[in-house]
Image (spheres, rainbow, N blue to C red):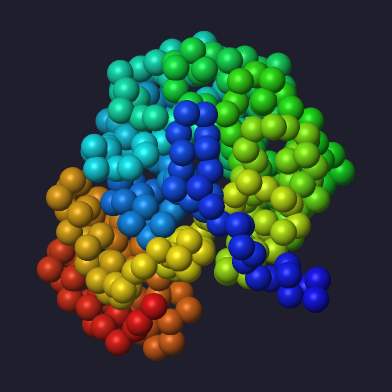
Amino acid sequence: MEELHMSTIQTGDIRPIRIGGLLLPSNVLMAPLAGYTCYPFRMLVYELGAGLCFTEMCSANALKYEDRATNRLLLTTEKEPIRAVQLLGGNPAVMEQMSKSPLLADFDIIDINMGCPVPNVFKSGEGSALMQDPKRAAAIIRGCKKSGKIITVKCRVGIREDELFAAEFARICEDAGADMITIHGRTRSMMYDGEPHRKEIEQAKAAVSIPVIANGGIFSVEDAAKMLASTSADGIMIARYGLEHPFIFSELTGTLCQKTPLQLLLEQLDLTAQYYDETFTLNYIKKIASYMMKKRKGTKRYKESLYKSGSLKELRNIITLIFADHPT
């Protein structure tokens, strides 16, 4: 019976959640993913029931120097229900300055990346490296709070397997003024593989009063139920599986969606082409379609044709061919 409970969404598990002064419509969040969570994808998951979705990771240093590619990551419109940007940086002064930047004026929430495990980010003292320097991490949170925006933090359960300290770090974030913390259940050394340390997330939840969101290893409704039941977290954050099967958001939240994968992809193509150039649109749609093809039988033979598509018309035709006979 316990196993059944762990694999089934319970009444009250999925619900609205308050972060600072904002009430999110659901506690099922989409993770910030480099190369994917651009404006069109965020609009897609909001439509399917996600309570919150963040921009791709934006470097505070790149914003400081008005890097054009980074500025493109910040594209949003008044149609986006809640606008949340993820900021990466290790210098408290620069982070504070950029949190107040006019470039972020349209955003309601700033999420501070303290979990990225990528070697070059870690070596530069950013991302998960901030977990090794709690004083600097706290200074960054305090500085960003001066922007007047809601400040959230995304981190991990620790750096190595022999040193897990999610609860301690969550308290540091809360004391510095964070309004929410998302904890990826893996350590920095685990990168994106291995079983999440759910017990560490549970301990962090018990240690603070701000909302704690559990992240890592959620690839089905059953995984989501297990994460919520085993951590007592206030919500969950879905990452790669949201690309492969965006309908997970409607399945978890009960949001009515009668569209097919083909309809979603073609809408994504049109919306992306409306706001971005053809090169960006081609690359982005190919990546999304490739993810959504992953477990669909008989589609592998089309992958080469998908990636060779050289125009939006050609891409539309091959996507229609691949997904025409595939319901959700």
Residue 296 x %, y %: 43, 82
Q: Residue furthest front?
A: 11
Camera-nearest residue between 60 and 3: 3
Please name the residue shown 81% across and 71% down the image: 2
Q: Residue at x 69, y 32 (%)?
A: 209
Residue 112 lies, in percent from the top left, at: 54, 30
Nearer-the-camera pick, 130 or 21: 21
In the rendered structure, the answer to whether residue 143 lies left or right of residue 209 reads left
Q: Residue at x 44, y 16 (%)?
A: 147
Quadrant of the snapshot with the C terminus: bottom left
Residue lying at the far left of the rendered structure = 313
Q: Quadrant of the N terminus?
A: bottom right
Q: Residue at x 74, y 27 (%)?
A: 171
Task: Judge from the rendering whether residue 265 lies leftward or rightward of residue 155; answer left or right.
Answer: left
Position in image of residue 315 (x %, y %): 20, 69
308 up-or-down from 63: above or below: below
Which residue occupies the foreground of this view, 23 or 316? 23
Q: How many marks?
A: 0
> Residue 108, can we see it?
yes
